[in-house]
Image (cartoon, grey):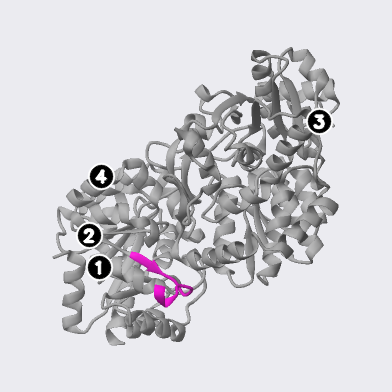
Amino acid sequence: MHNKVDFSQFPDQRGHFGRYGGRFVAETLMEALHELDEAWQNYRNDPEFLAELDADSAHYVGRPTPLYHAEHWSQRLGGAQIYLKREDLNHTGAHKINNTIGQALLAKRMGKTRLIAETGAGQHGVASATVAARLGMECVVYMGAEDIQRQALNVYRMRLLGATVQPVTSGSRTLKDALNEALRDWVANVDDTFYMIGTVAGPHPYPLMVREFQAVIGREAREQMLTDYGCLPDALVACVGGGSNAIGLFHPFLNDAEVVMYGVEAAGSGIETGHHAATLCAGRPGVLHGNRTYLLNDADGQIIETHSVSAGLDYPGVGPEHAWLKDMGRAHYVAVTDDEALRGFHDLTRIEGIIPALESSHALAYVTKLAPTMGPDQSIVVNLSGRGDKDIYTVARLEGIQL
Amino acid sequence: MNRITRRFQELSRTGRKALIPYITAGDPRPELTVPMLHTLVAAGADIIELGVPFSDPMADGPVIQKACERALTHGMSLRGVLSLVREFRQTDSETPLVLMGYLNPVESLGYDAFVAGARDAGVDGVLTVDLPPEEAAELAEPLKAAGIATIFLLAPTSSRERICHTAELAQGYLYYVSLKGVTGSAAINVAEVAEKLAMIRTCTDLPVGVGFGIKDPPTAAAVAKVADAVVVGSTLVAKMAELADDPERMRHEVAQLVAAMRQAMDQA
């Protein structure tokens, strides 16, 4: 059925991917979203805007990122050839900056002087603080009080960059609550403030806009495969929290029906334990943070707390486009546990000399299962969405080592 | 006729404005909610907005966020709210009750089950904060068929075109959010509110209530001069939180506050 869908035509004008997406916010935000949507529609194909974005991507972020053939690891696994899309080599160490440089350019054109953002692990917060520093804009990052404890390094990085890190003590004191608090700030300061959402969730146009800024990942990977190896990959693998690095890789390949896609969620201690963040694998549709999508919620529709070794995947929702791709079967969603992800982390570090982020390690862990089921003439592109320096303390602690 | 419409007609005949207190169901404890509803009626409430607690109340300030957390800690749920409404209706068949909350608990229960449950319990209106008119048809139509009003928010930033479109879908009354911010924010500017209300009235004959930022009797009185209804939430919820351990005193002081607002509005 999905062979007939032209994926470039979604979402529709009101932000719907089938029954997912949309704009479920209080009236107090509707005008701000209209204003944002108008500006986005105005600039998304504007040659000057795109030229500035391309120049920043090249000279500030460091794009294009390499597509690296992980030969040693491929050989060890004894199956498909594995190619790593090296988003870890971007400035600030992850794919998040692809989105923040884009949104910041838009904010500047809209005449906004204040940037706000939510962050979980701190990667999007750092990417936001970075572009704010560069453009001389005020920056406030909302971060759950729990996460501030877990991610001291990134908190300090944001403060060095001049951002105010605002602890969020409501609810479960994690990423979802930080998002609530950022929305509350936006409602109250809508005249001068631009809200930079860090993932492909939130009310329309965010899932579309963030996807467009992240799709550079898949566009480059597709061209690199065709140029360097003369074929498309057989499979794509990326981790999914909110889902921005995954949609960024997947989207330019969606109309290539022969390319199989796997989004890898965080199974935490195991889905059966209830301590996980595997929204698509174990959740059901609902409405949160401005869009209809899969959610982890209890029988009464209250959002429940998630658990993952990787703070960046610790989110009870997921981008609505992923929900839609799951239902139609265009992409497959799987989950790997904390332990499996940690093994992926060590494998890549020791075999290829690349320390991956714990988020990306979930994708790597699934590759260790997938690659051996495929032949050596087949290929997998896996999104290495971030580098693991930020996770060193977490890994050391889990192994009983004090740094 | 829906109880909300009937109540506004009665008020209009006597030249009075509606006082609409808000409390969160189950806060501070579920067994205190129904007695508090009766207390509010006795103190002069014309309509009551009963908050359905949600884990992620995006449009609410700290006072109502904490009320939601307290209610959820005590196991309150949308089903639980409906049984509180049923209990209230055993002794009060006149006072209109409006459920105010967020969409996900309703999605989780299912629209059909929710509408049937709300109708059977005696709910008169539903205000779903994160359900703007663009997305509302799927819920508003069955509600209307069940005789329940769908109540929409309007904001200082809403354009006239939007207001008129929203008014076409709305029933019962329109709820004008008096400031850019969340519930319980800084005090409102009555002159600005009056200006916006005049514009809203060029679109609709529905009564218009004003809420967010009304903290004391003088403000309630000032707003009552320009609006059809005055909604008071965070101030009452904060008082309830403060006196949660002394339910008698809590009811007494909340009743005093509501009565003072009633009196100020009626003299305005």
- Rendered-image quadrant of the C terminus of chain A: top right
Element carrying mark 1:
loop
The residue that appears at 36% across and 41% down in the rendered structure is B108
Q: Are marks 3 and 4 on the same chain?
A: no
Could you tell me how many numbered marks the image carries? 4
Residue topped by disc 4: B112
Question: Label 2 is placed on what type of residue?
Answer: Asp
Residue topped by disc 2: B124
Q: CA distance from mark 2 to mark 3?
A: 62 Å
Q: Are marks 2 and 3 in contact (CB under 8 Å)?
A: no
- Rendered-image quadrant of the N terminus of chain A: top left
Q: CA distance from mark 1 to mark 2?
A: 9 Å
The residue that appears at 79% across and 52% down in the rendered structure is A57
Residue topped by disc 1: B172
Question: Label 1 is placed on what type of residue?
Answer: Gly
A283 up-or-down from B116: above or below: above
> Residue A3: horizontal and vertical position, in percent?
50, 34
Give the residue furthest to the front: A230
Question: Label 4 is placed on what type of residue?
Answer: Asp
Element carrying mark 4:
helix
Q: Nearer the viewer, mark 3 or mark 1?
A: 3
Q: Are marks 1 and 4 in contact (CB under 8 Å)?
A: no
For marks 4 and 2 on the same chain, the one whose residue lies earlier in the sequence = 4
- Callout 1: 10 Å neighbours few (<14), some, many (20+)? many
- The chain containing the residue under callout 3 comes to A
Residue topped by disc 3: A68
Q: Nearer the viewer, mark 1 or mark 2?
A: 1
> Residue A170: horizontal and vertical position, in percent?
55, 51
